Image (tube, grey):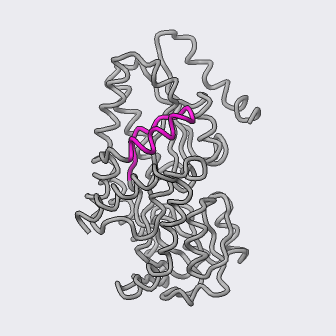
């Protein structure tokens, strides 16, 4: 951590010369051109325009400040003011956040899912309060796309996961989900996935299409499988003490911009995933696309019923209130 802090001290010095300029440092879990980068670049543009340059937003793409867990730590101690934190990663710190990793929770209507993520009061009460205890503030949540399995063999039923090594995020419910399917799970950092697939250390992984294309995971796997299991959800969180010290004007600008970004990023991530799938098919015409039928999905759905009980055991009454509210919200447009 000392290395990380010293590594990005110097870029901030130049801004210190202008005492009237505030610098908001924004960390990303993804590389340039990704959904998170698209979000951050538009956020930067809007904030700087609204404040007429009184606030500058510095963006740090994936790898510049370490892995995803490092970004959360840097935000909690105030070195970063803002960061993206995917629910699979931050769920190890805030168990309530793992609710979004419960398989087959979401509606089939992604516009509705986005609305729930950005507005549901139970999310911002139960998860928000837990984050405040860690010196962080939940500003918003949004979709990045369907989680698609890339594998070296066809997976159409749970039995196909026999003798199969699945790379997973280091998230307890994600690990347990694939173990319930019968796979051996191997948690690995995002940066190590391509090499592990290439070396046959793992046989598959799961990510949105845009990430599969930009990280070239399709080059070292043969199948893209839509199982309907989950969506990739990320959060934007802030350092809580920093947020509380913002002027009323800057706090309003931040809150208004975060609200505006929900519709913007929903459309952009949808368009990006469609265009990236086309790029994969053009680059690798023999890639095999499999979309599980409802009957096939049900076979997987039955196996992961214990995941809800595990979530409730980890989160207690707070998790029960949250899960109940979200099941009701998502079910209204299944």
Based on the picture, tell me whether residue 128 belongs to the magenta stretch. Answer: yes
Residue depicted at 45% across the width and 44% down the height: 127
Task: Give the residue at x 67% y 77%.
Answer: 184
Horizontal side, residue 279 vs residue 158: left or right: left
Q: Quadrant of residue 277?
A: bottom left
In which quadrant of the rendered view does residue 298 lie? bottom left
Which of 156 and 284 lies nearest the eye of the viewer?
Answer: 156
The reply, left or right, for residue 113 in relation to residue 164 is left
- In the image, the segment drawn in magenta is 123-142
Residue 241 percent location from the top left of the image:
52, 24
Above or below — where is 109 with respect to 296? above
The answer to which of 73 and 3 lies nearer the viewer is: 73
- In the rendered image, the vertical position of residue 175 relative to residue 40, given as above or below: below
- In the rendered image, residue 112 lying in the magenta stretch gets the answer no
Going by the image, does 325 lie left or right of 151? left
Quarter of the figure that contains the C terminus: bottom left
Most distant residue in the front direction: 317
Taking the spot 49% from the left edge, 51% from the top edge, the residue there is 96
* Image quarter (top left, top right, bottom left or bottom right) of the N terminus: top right
Give x and y (percent) for residue 195. 70, 67
Which residue is found at the position 54% from the left and 56% from the top? 88
Height in image: 82 above or below 295?
above
Q: Residue furthest right?
A: 2
16 or 102, nearer to the observer: 102
* Residue 148 coordinates in the image, percent (x, y): 47, 71
């Amino acid at each position: 951590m000392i290395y990380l802090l010293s590594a990005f001290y110097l870029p901030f010095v130049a801004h210190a010369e202008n005492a009237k300029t505030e610098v908001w440092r924004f960390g990303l879990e993804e590389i340039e051109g990704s959904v998170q980068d698209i979000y951050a670049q538009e956020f930067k543009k809007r904030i700087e325009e609204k404040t007429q340059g009184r606030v500058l937003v510095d963006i740090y793409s994936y790898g510049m400040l370490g892995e995803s867990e490092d970004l959360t730590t840097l935000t909690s101690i105030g070195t970063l003011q803002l960061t993206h934190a995917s629910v699979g990663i931050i769920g190890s710190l805030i168990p309530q956040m793992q609710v979004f990793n419960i398989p087959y929770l979401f509606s089939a209507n992604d516009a509705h899912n986005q609305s729930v993520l950005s507005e549901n009061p139970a999310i911002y009460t139960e998860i928000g309060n837990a984050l405040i205890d860690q010196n962080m503030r939940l500003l918003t949540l949004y979709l990045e796309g369907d989680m698609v399995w890339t594998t070296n063999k066809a997976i159409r039923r749970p039995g196909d996961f026999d003798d199969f090594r699945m790379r997973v995020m280091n998230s307890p419910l994600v690990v347990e989900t694939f173990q319930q399917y019968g796979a051996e799970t191997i948690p690995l950092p995002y940066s190590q996935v391509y090499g592990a697939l290439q070396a046959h250390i793992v046989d598959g992984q799961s990510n949105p299409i845009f990430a599969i294309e930009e990280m070239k995971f399709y080059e070292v796997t043969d199948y893209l499988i839509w199982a309907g299991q989950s969506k990739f959800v990320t959060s934007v969180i802030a350092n809580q003490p920093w947020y509380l010290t913002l002027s009323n004007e800057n706090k309003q600008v931040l809150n208004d911009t975060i609200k505006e970004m929900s519709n913007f990023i929903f459309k952009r991530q949808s368009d990006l995933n469609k265009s990236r799938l086309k790029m994969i098919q053009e680059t690798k015409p023999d890639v095999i696309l499999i979309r599980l039928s409802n009957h096939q999905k049900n076979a997987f759905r039955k196996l992961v019923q214990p995941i809800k009980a595990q979530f409730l055991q980890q989160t207690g009454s707070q998790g029960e209130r949250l899960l109940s509210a979200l099941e009701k919200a998502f079910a209204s447009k299944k």
